[in-house]
Image (cartoon, rainbow, N blue to C red):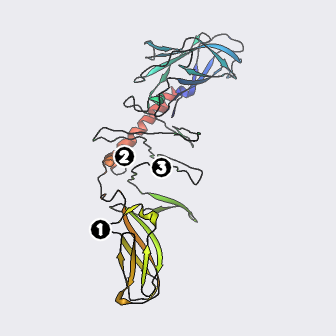
Amino acid sequence: MIGVINRSKGSWIMKARHCPGAGIIMFTGIVILASIAGAEIPRVISYQGRISDGEGNPVTDGTYNMRFRLFDAETGGNLEWDSGVQSIALDGGIFNVLLGDAGQSAVDLPFDEDYWLVVTFDGVNQLLRQRLSSVGYAYMASGLVPGTEIWGSADTGNRATVAATNIAIDGTGVCGVSMPDEGMTSKGVLGITGSEVGGFGVFGVTYNGTGYGVYSSGNFAASGTKSCVVKTSRGPTLMYCQESPENWFEDFGEGRLVSGRCRIELDPLFLETVTIDDENPMHVFIQQKGKCSGTYVRPGFTGFDVIEQDEGTSDISFSYRVVAKRKGFEEKRLDYCKAAESDPYLYEEIRIKSLRKIRKKSRMQFSSAGN
C-alpha cells in the first residue's frame, strides 16, 4: 500500500541563496512510504522532489549535497534521525532518494507519534518542517500501532484519494485486515460515500471475464440491496437478489412424463454443494406444461420421481425447481450480525454522526493543505 503526503499543496520555500541560474530556491516534494503486507516492514522512505528557482525553472542538472533529518517537533525538539550529507543527482530539477537506504542509518522509529522532516539542499535548510502525519504512516497500517489510519479526501473531479496498484503476476494492491478482540468489531477496509447523487464507498474493477472487481473470502453481508446491474434500453438497471432466512442453493431443469412417470437425477456437481438427507430434505416445485391428472413428487437423496396422480399415463413435459441446504451451513437461520450494530445505513443517528465526522476531518485536511 502506498500513502502520500502533500503538505501546502506540495511546495515549500527555502532560504535565498546563490547557485548557478537560481535566485530564490523553490522546493516541491512528495513523501511515499511503502509497505509489504505480511512481510518484514522495510524501514525506508521514498522521497521525491523538485528544486526550482524563483521563476519556477529547474536548477541546473548535476549532483548536489542534500541532507534529510526527522525531528519530533515542528520547531526545536529532538533530532530523531539524520541521513547525513548525501550526494543526490538532479535531472530537470527532480530527485529521488530512499531515506534509510544503504549508506544511511535505518529509519528505525516507532511512528507512534508525529515527526517533522527537514531537508537541506546544498547547505540551505527548508524554512518549514514537513509534518509526517498518520496519513504518511502507510507502512504501519498493518496494525502495529493502534489507531493508525490512511485517510484520503477528494474535493473535486474524478480523483482517487487513496490508491494502490499491483502489476505483478500475483499479489495485492490494497489489503485490509481486521482481527478484533473477542466481543469487539472492527473494519479492515472502510469505504464511505455521503453523496446524494451516487458514488462509491469502495470501487473494484476487472477488465476481463476471469477476474473479480471485489472478492470476499468468507462471509459477505450488506444492509442495503445486493444487486446485479444490467444494460437495458433505459440504461444501467438493477436486478435484485432473493433473500432467505436460511442458506439455500437451487437448480432448475426440465423433464417429461412418459406413461405418467419421470425420474430426474440431479447434477452431480450440484450435489457436491448441498446436503440432502432425512434431516435436510430437498424441496421440489413442478410446473406442468400440458394437461394431466396432476403430479406429485417422491424425493430421494440424489434425485426425485415425478408421478402423475390417479395412476395417470400422460406424456407431457414439465419444468422443475429444486432447493436444498448449502453444505456446511445447514443450521444457519436468521443469525445475529454483531458487525452491523454500528451500521450507519441501519441506524440514522450513527449515519448523521459519521457524516459529521467525515466532513470535519475533510475540512481540517483542506485547511492544513492551504497553510
Q: Amino acid at mark 1?
A: Asp
Relative to 103, does residue 238 appear above or below in the rendering? below
Can you tell which mark lies on residue 351?
2
In the rendering, at what x and y percent does residue 62 appear? Answer: 70, 16
- Tag nearer the camera, 2 or 1: 1
The residue mark sitting in front, 3 or 2, is: 3
- Distance Cα–Cα, label 2 vs label 1: 46 Å
**Looking at the image, do the residues carrying marks 2 and 1 touch, with CB atoms under 8 Å apart?**
no
Res. 236 in view: no
Residue at position x 56%, y 39% from top?
166
Residue 115 vs residue 343: left or right? right
* Disc 1: which residue: 278
Q: Nearer the viewer, residue 125 or 204?
A: 204
Image point (48%, 22%), residue name: 131
Give the mark, 1 or 3, whose residue is nearer the N terminus: 3
Identify the residue position indicated by label 3 in the image. 215
Q: Earlier in the sequence, mark 2 or mark 1?
A: 1
Q: Amino acid at mark 2?
A: Arg
Q: Please tell me how crowded label 2 is: few (under 14), some (14-19), or many (20+) other residues with Cα within 10 Å.
A: some
**Residue 55 image offset from top left, x and y in percent:** 68, 21
Residue type marked 3: Tyr
Residue 175: x, y in percent? 47, 39
Q: Between marks 1 and 3, how big is the CA–CA gap?
A: 34 Å
The circle on residue 165 is none
Residue 120 spot, x, y in % from top left = 57, 13
Quadrant of residue 296 within the rendered picture:
bottom left
Q: Nearer the viewer, mark 1 or mark 3?
A: 1
Element type where label 2 sits in the image: helix
